[in-house]
Amino acid sequence: MGRRDRHGSAILLPHGLGHRQRRNLYVADTQNNRIRKITPGGVVTTIAGSGGSGWVDGPAATAQFNGPEAVAVDVVGNVFVGDRNRIRKITLAGVVSTLAGTGAQGFADGPGLTVAQFAAPTGVAIDNSGNIYVADSYNERIRKVVDSTFPGPCIGPPNTANVAWYPFDNTAGTTTANLSTGNMGTLINSPTYIQGVVAGALRFDGINDHVNSPSTIVTNIGPAGLLQTCNGGYSTCRGDFSIDAWIRVDTTAPTWAIPIIDKTKGSGPTTKGYSFFVYQRNKLGLQLADGVGPAGYTNYLSPVINNLTASWHHVAVTVGRRASPAGIKWYDNGVIIGSSDPTVSTTSRYGSLVNDGPLTIGATGKLTAWFKGDIDELEILNRELTTAEVLAIYQAGPAGKCK
Ligand SMILES: [Ca+2]
Ligand SMILES: [Ca+2]
């Protein structure tokens, strides 16, 4: 009964394979009383469980499971475990708690910790609203557990320098609110309202759907390093900025660049502005266009992101164009996945990105390419978000930023 992590791991009687939207497979390792994770590269780690048999809550390393047989992962990355007669939860931060089940085998509905009983929950699943569905096998029933800590508290939005924030929480109508400046967007060709990660989201058909928002001073980005005069009470904005959103790329989206948001105008060497896009369905891209040099613009690409299609990802790009530290940082689900340098001599993009073209969501400003998939909680800030801020937005998950 050896238990070996990393390559060549031994997993005893695995049950309940749960997969997170990205790369990892989660396993209820029943006889080892551990919850394991398998990366696409085949590396196995233990995310919770000391190995002892029992129901001990607390830090993942010392927590105990009691013959766990089912796992599921929510949109944020919390893991839920069908654990004999209880439903357990492992948070992103690695804390194990008991969500429901007194421990006695039986059948009872009611408050999770004092009344509810299960009998061998051998399957769990979770929806985007945090409801957990349990295949309660000996009871021959499908049960529902509501996680009262879900979605948890919303986080204070990083509101300094927030210059656009489209939550897409409407359910009807052809205008979509901008919580930052009130510069509303107009829905063109009927992108559809859907359930998003944080309340509503918009689905773009990849044919002609987009959102058009007029150009404003604050969504224009100035030349690198210089203090700009910005309205909205922000007096220190400059050539740095950030864009973040939850996105779900359709599996049939084109492999060329499809824009999430685009604030460019002009073409070729006279292009001005910026565009944040998905490329080849597996990378993020950013165009910086200052109209300088033979090309006028540069496209920067992130490393490959696995499974960017068909499931929600929180993506972000932060753009620093100062002398030091400078850089474009790419984020996927709260973590930096790579960087690019907008200041190297041959392709430096220090110039002004200002133009009077519209801010277009789901299409290029010239309407030459279309996003196919879903976008939620799109925002622009005229400064670099910090690593901690990006992680906080991701970890807030369905609670999102406080509105
Ligand atoms: Ca939303
Ligand atoms: Ca349409």
Image (cartoon, grey):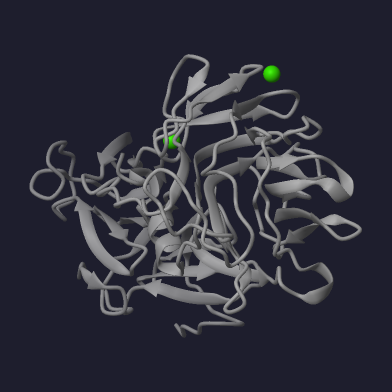
Using the image, determine if residue 207 lies above or below residue 332. Answer: above
Q: In this orientation, which residue lies closer to the viewer: 65 or 126?
A: 126
Q: Quadrant of residue 50?
A: bottom left
User: How far across and down, in percent of the image, does residue 243 sit?
Assistant: 55, 51
Q: Can you say which quadrant of the picture contains the N terminus?
A: bottom left
Q: Farthest residue to the right: give it.
A: 294
Q: Quadrant of the C terminus?
A: top left
Q: Can residue 283 be seen by looking at this rendering?
A: no
From the top left corner, tell me how far across and down residue 62 is, in percent.
26, 79
Q: Quadrant of ligand 1?
A: top left
Give the residue furthest to the top: 173
Q: Nearer the viewer, residue 148 or 387?
A: 387
In this image, 208 relative to 77: left or right?
A: right
Residue at 84% x, 55% y is 296
**Residue 203 visible within the image:** yes
Image x and y of residue 72, in percent: 43, 52
Number of labels in the image equals: 0
Seen in the image, is 98 located left or right of residue 1?
left
Residue placed most toward the observer, 161 or 52: 161
